[in-house]
Image: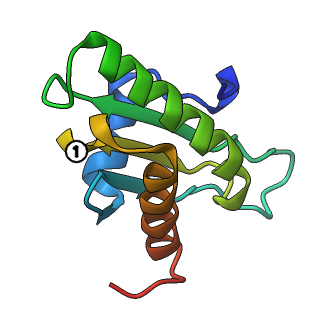
Amino acid sequence: MLPTDNRLRRREEFATAVRRGRRSGRSLLVVHLRSGATDPHAQGESAPPTRAGFVVSKAVGGAVVRNKVKRRLRHLMRERVAQLPPGSLVVVRALPPAGDAANEELARDLDAALQRLLGGGAR
């Protein structure tokens, strides 16, 4: 499970990540990343934690399928939060094929999208 400190909850945070962040799309999901805007050399300020949120619409499937996809994505992001810059906002939007995808496929698409957003991958 993704720790409480690493979860996006407010609508404004989701909107900031989607509107002002960079986007990388894959066949199963779209990842929006808004890098941390804090100054790491500022006095007395600790870097806020990286936070992630998930959007899984009814197009993915029924309630059981949507919740299963969200649980899988939360678990995958928990393992990857440390790779992201402190203070980043991440929104992972599941596309309809994600409902039928295996964990390995979701992990592969998530890794590829994050790699591209962090500057390590080609289009």
Q: Relative to the observer, which residue lies in front, 17 or 112?
A: 112
Residue at point 21%, 15% (across, down): 62
Question: Residue 117: which quarter of the image?
Answer: bottom left
Task: Name which residue lies at 29% across and 47% down.
Answer: 18
Residue 105 lies, in percent from the top left, at 43, 55
Image quadrant containing the N terminus? top right
Position of residue 46 relative to residue 121, above or below, is: above
Relative image position of residue 14 (x, y in whole percent): 35, 35
Image-quadrant location for residue 37: bottom right
Please state which of residues 2 and 72 is positioned toward the viewer in this rendering: 72
Left or right for 38, reference 43: left
Question: Dot 1 corresponds to which residue?
Answer: 97
Which one is nearer the viewer's eye here, 46 or 86? 86
Q: Give the position of the C terminus as an image quadrant.
A: bottom left
What kind of element bears circle 1?
A: helix
Amino acid type at mark 1: Pro
**Colouring:** rainbow
Instruction: Tell me how many marks there are.
Output: 1
Residue furthest to the bottom in view is 122
Q: Is residue 121 visible?
A: yes
Residue 3, relative to residue 123: is it above or below? above
Q: Which residue is drawn at 61% across and 35% down?
A: 75
Q: Report whether 2 appears left or right of 42.
A: left
Residue 77 at x, y percent in the picture: 59, 43
User: Residue at coordinates 25% horizontally, 50% vertically from top-left?
Assistant: 19
